[in-house]
Amino acid sequence: MSPARFPLFAWCALWLSAAGCGVVASSATAAEATRQEGSDPSPLWTFAWVTDMHLDASRRAYLAEAFRQLRTEWKPHFVLVTGDNNAHPAPPRDPARPESLGVRRQRFLRAFLDEHLQLPSAIIPGDNWPQDFDAVFGPKQYSFDCGGLHFLLLAPDRICHGSKLEGLSAFDPPTRAWIADDLARHRQRPTIVAIHEPIYPPTFLDARPLHTIVARHPHVVAVLQGHLHRDLDYRSRTTAYLVGPSLGMPPTQALKLVDVHADRLVLKTLAYHGANGRFELLDRRQTVEIAESLRGGLAVPAGRFEMANYDALPARPLIQDPQLSLRLGEMLRNAAGFFLPP
């Protein structure tokens, strides 16, 4: 193989290994955290977590049915959507006033959610098809409170596509400062960070700086991540770094239900069975304990879903930055540090 192809090969090999290591770690953690469903009291409330839908023409009927079952049978308070959402464009509105492909994709996604999900949602873009998210959905970096939890949703400011290598994405310094400030202002409330490309394991350029920020805040009880299409579970002393399975792509097409209890979160997996076209609840449970000092505000949300105490950075276009390709070595060092920590 040529030296020019080696970095891409090495990166792929590292992340294939990461997925494998994660499955082992995840299984062990899940075994320790499993509770029998019959002995688990009813939660205060529940939200759903969907990631990596990869909606296109071939998956429209499947995802419409998935959302129908979620809406009619499981009835979460709202749905958290963490990226790699939709490749399918809506038809042009007016040929005399051309729209970008990105706007048409985001318009189709919004209409699809309105028609088939019919539930409140909080959504961010992924590294695939993120263009013009801001033009249709608004801010991609925002926070809110619901049912005693604080949610912080994040997406990068700049990205480098066309390199045939994923992970060349970064956050600008003002965004990092806003993230740190948001977490500091909500230190008394159990917090969930949601992002597409995982910060742990580190899969993109600014994963380690963001991990450093999160690690300073023990009230961050969970980081919900997508991108790897695997159900992975990594734990620090205070925080669960979870990677969700892809709803749209093999090997396991699934989504999560997150039950909010007075002292913990319990994540349950709904996996698709092609033989009967049904989503069925797996035996696996992942439990995220909430420290006693953070439990005081947990409660059943009053009425319909509302983003209380909403805050956001202004909506703005994603910047295509070819200079990020010069930081390839940094990204590979991030991955190497995950496997070989100092």
Image (tube, rainbow, N blue to C red):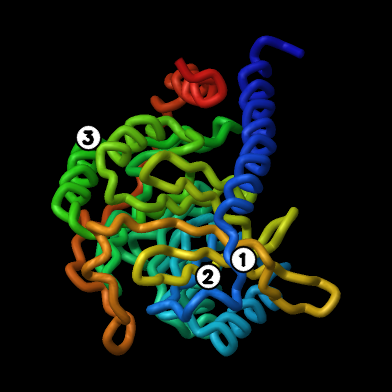
Residue at 17% x, 68% y is 309
Question: What is the x, y in percent for residue 224?
Answer: 45, 53
Report if the CB atoms under discs 2 and 1 are less than 8 Å apart.
yes
Residue at 31% x, 41% y is 214
Report if the CB atoms under discs 3 and 1 are less than 8 Å apart.
no
- Identify the element where label 2 is drawn: strand
Examine the rendered structure and indicate whether residue 146 appears above or below residue 28: below
Q: Quadrant of the N terminus?
A: top right
* Amino acid at circle 3: Pro
Residue at 49% x, 21% y is 337
* Amino acid at circle 2: Leu
User: Which residue bears the numbered disc 1?
Assistant: 269
* Amino acid at circle 1: Thr
- Identify the element where label 3 is drawn: helix
Residue placed most toward the observer, 333 or 235: 235
User: Which residue bears the numbered disc 2?
Assistant: 257
Question: What is the x, y in percent for residue 156?
Answer: 36, 44
Q: Earlier in the sequence, mark 2 or mark 1?
A: 2
Q: Earlier in the sequence, mark 3 or mark 1?
A: 3
Instruction: Inspect this view and state whether residue 77 appears.
Output: yes
Residue placed most toward the observer, 118 or 269: 269
Marks 3/2: CA distance? Answer: 34 Å
Residue placed most toward the observer, 9 or 320: 9
> Crowding at label 3, few (<14), some or many (≥20) Cα neighbours within 10 Å?
few
Q: Which mark is residue 8?
A: none
- Identify the element where label 1 is drawn: strand
Question: What is the x, y in percent for residue 287?
Answer: 49, 59
Q: Which mark is residue 173?
A: 3
Residue 249 location, quadrant:
bottom right
> Crowding at label 1, few (<14), some or many (≥20) Cα neighbours within 10 Å?
many
Marks 2/1: CA distance? Answer: 6 Å
